[in-house]
Amino acid sequence: MGIDNGNGHDGKDEFNHGAYGVTGDEKFNSEFIDRAVVANADVPIRQLEAPPLVRDLSTEDRVVLERKLVRKIDFRLLPMIILMYIMNYLDRNNLPSAKLAGLSSDLHLTGDQFNTAVSVLFVGYLLMQGFVEAAYFPGCLFFLSSWYTRKELAFRTAMLYSGSLISGAFSGLIAAGITAHMDGARGLRAWRWLFIIEGSITVVIAGFALLVLPNFPRTTKWLSEEERQLAIWRLQEDIGTDDWVGSEQQSFFHGFKLAAQDAKMWILMIMLTGIVSSGSVTNFFPIVVKTLGYNNIDTLLLSAPPYVLAVIATFINAWHADRTGERYLHVVLPLCVGVAAFILGVATTSTAPRYVAMMLMVPGVYTGYVVVLAWIANVMPRPPAKRAAAQAAINAVSNCSSIYASYMYPDSAAPRYTVAFSVDCATAALAIIMATLLRFILVGLNRKLDRGEHVEGAVAVAAGVPDEEAKKGFRFLT
């Protein structure tokens, strides 16, 4: 798969394609090229010099321009992708609300047939990675990593994932309104209107997104020439090399081959699988809340506050993770809260303690989840095909847990859901163990870099990087 660099080249003219992909100068001098080989990329790395408009900036001017650029990117990208993810998640996770709105009775579902329907939904979601709405989330993760530096990713990923949490809050409110006021309208039950209204809105918003969302910094027209050079350069200096190495190196299969050879991908895959499995409670959250004994409308309304708390906790945690550059504790500590919430949910049937547990389940799981998503790009920054393949593979495999988790919430297991909450607790603990293992590995790799030893996936610092950064060079975020 070739990627146009915005200058009419397809990457095959290996080192003189210009357009600010190398130096911003069409007359790029090959003396700036370092052909040192990286073990996990089997292609030469090009050490880079800052493009002319960036090179001429003072430190103060660079800081001011970069802040302006990041704000401009934020306002252009984030509102639309968050809005689309809200609708994406609403479409894909409104089955529990539809059940309370009459789906099971209308379709005469008995036994575990509803659970099977949820399971089949996720089978289709996994098999369709790369098609329709299924590819949206991993695609957005790759999209964000193509615009933001590693230390900016956690907060932006949190903002993206807040779409799912906001949809969880609004899903209950929307379903409550439709159930209360549209049941029987034009001869259709409320759960049918739920699918019709939410699905129609998604299609309309997607049409507007085609006009709003950009491609990549190299080909974006709404940036000035100075902003475009800086947008490309700051990503290159973040990892010390240009992402572009030739069209033959950008295929998904080549990227997956590189990712599969990296043990960090498998650790992250197990970690995220554990988190997603423990978060399977959200697929049945209105049904779990129903065990408190309230009517359907009140149940749907009570489903919203845990998601609101999750949005707040996720933003604060991700913001602090980016500010400090720390990842491990920002993943593990929220999961510990989640473990405690699942234990409390099993231990009592009293209304107040159980609702406290439900309030903590969603933020306990997903506050650290978004940091893990950013961690993937942090520890596998190049080449872009490897990063994209790793994100897609990890997302696909981790969601496999939703297939079996669908059978852990039968009506007969209410109100304690002992098996479900016990499995959720165990898989959250598994994620903590994997995060600990990954941190040990990354600390060891950083020590090698401190000693000047070669490390796969780590690259030397680029020419033109500020002195304080150049002294440290590339380090894995732990």
Image (cartoon, rainbow, N blue to C red):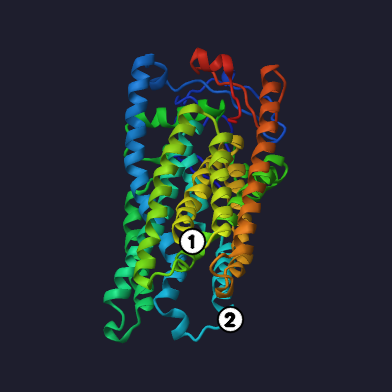
The disc labelled 2 sits on which kind of residue? Gly
Disc 2, SS = loop
| Between marks 2 and 1 in the image, the one whose residue lies nearer the viewer | 1
Disc 1, SS = loop
Which of 469 and 421 lies nearest the eye of the viewer? 421
Q: Label 1 neighbourhood size at 10 Å, few (<14), some (14-19), many (20+)?
A: few
Q: Residue at x 48, y 50 (%)?
A: 360
The quarter of the picture where residue 326 lies is top right
Quadrant location of the C terminus in the rendered image: top right
Q: Is 282 displayed left or right of 177 in the figure?
A: right
Please tell me the numbered disc located at residue 213: none
Which of 217 and 331 lies nearest the eye of the viewer? 331
Residue assigned mark 2? 111
Q: Looking at the picture, how far across and down is residue 263, in whole percent?
A: 72, 41
Q: Label 2 neighbourhood size at 10 Å, few (<14), some (14-19), many (20+)?
A: few
Q: Looking at the picture, how far across and down is residue 319, in whole percent?
A: 43, 35
The quarter of the picture where residue 35 lies is top right
Image height of 92 relative to 3, above or below: below
